[in-house]
Image (spheres, rainbow, N blue to C red):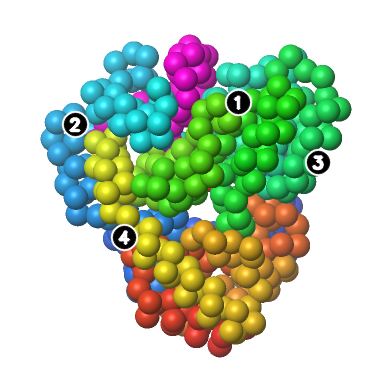
Amino acid sequence: MVPDLKTALAPNLDQRQAQSLYRYRRVLEGPQGPEIQVDGRRVWTFCSNDYLGLANHPKIRVAFMQGVQEYGVGSGAAHLVTGHSRAHHELEEALAEFVGRPRALLFSTGYLANLGVISALLGHQDAVFEDRLNHASLLDGGLLAGARFKRYRHRDCQALEAALAARRARRKLVVTDGVFSMDGDLAPLPELATVARHFDAWLLVDDAHGLGVLGEGGRGSLAHWGLGMAQVPILVGTLGKALGTFGAFVAGEEALVETLIQQARTYIYTTAPPPAVAAATLASLRLAEAESWRREKLAHLIAQFRQGAAQLGLQLMDSQTPIQPLLVGDSAAALKLSESLLARGMLITAIRPPTVPAGSARLRITLTAAHSETQVERLLEALAESL
Ligand SMILES: *Cc1c(COP(=O)(O)O)cnc(C)c1O
């Protein structure tokens, strides 16, 4: 007999409710920005990844609409069939140049890029070494590849070294976020690169939160640390965060990108993103690179927030990036704090397990170049009143 679906699923849903782990969506009206309309009211938000404030920029909107005029809406097919447009191709060339690598390959999302690149490079005879706090897509990529899988302690190069020394494998791949998505701290890339090289392992950096934000011209974590392809042969970047649009890419040498075109299943077996999105991203890449005032303003707001939070005695994490999480611990308490802030017109969603480790629920506060000093000041006041 076919089991009743509701009866089978209800216990897990009920348990999530009871543990304050149930997830809901809010319905937004209108565009992204520091002030949004959500569930029928206007609120200020401090939890998007639109770090440079580009998601609703007039020039990027125009580029998007021009892209639609030129290419229509749908791409019609996968990149390897008839889906790869001039707009996609130009964006790949621009991204490669931006990060200083021979080639870049567009993927539909960062999640797909990470699954695709790791599983194209590794198989059963290989081993992957991942920071414990890596993004879910990197962990899933390692598991999908069928490689031996080892997680090392957060930012702990000695733990990585021990793990690498203990494992024999055909290929070894060390995988890390450049900026950790839920904590905002940086991976110690120079040390990781040294350790990886010592054990003949490749290093993959996912710079979803560094690209556009860190380094000269917003070139990301690698530029921040002064590292190139010799130290980090495989670079993943995403376009839906600081660049304000949608999509992702993998950048590296010719042989890497050609291998992905032949073998990355999440590249091959999926429809190419709308060409207009690529056209919009090309415009946003130009803006992000040229308008360094956005990064300067962001740095100023981050300093203002951290200084204010220290005066209030808030326990912030060790982060100099736009990601400024306020650790709460208990999931129910994090939800309660989030609700109390919402009552004061500030939307910051509570991040709970399994997105973060058990017992480390938090408000993941993020700042953007589109926020004002006044908004940051008011956020600090609202936090003081809610805690
Ligand atoms: C957001 C994120 C991704 C996923 O990118 P999408 O384009 O949103 O699928 C991958 N890696 C990290 C570190 C991220 O923060």
Task: Give residue 136's quadrant in the image.
Answer: top right
Does the rendering let one see residue 35? yes
Q: In the rendered image of this protein, does residue 318 appear above or below residue 145?
A: below
Instruction: Determine which of the numbered discs, if any, sits on residue 293 in the image.
Output: 4
Label 1 lies in ligand 1 vicinity (Cβ under 8 Å):
no
Task: Give residue 357's quadrant in the image.
Answer: bottom right
Q: On the image, numbered disc 1 is attached to which residue?
A: 118
Name the residue rendered at 34%, 31% in the picture: 97
| Disc 2 residue type (three-letter) | Gly
Q: Nearer the viewer, mark 1 or mark 3?
A: 3
Secondary structure of residue under mark 2? loop
Q: On the image, numbered disc 3 is attached to which residue?
A: 159
Q: Nearer the viewer, mark 1 or mark 4?
A: 4
N-terminal-most mark, 2 or 3: 2
Q: On the image, numbered disc 2 is attached to which residue?
A: 72
Image coordinates of residue 129 in percent, x first then y, are: 72, 32
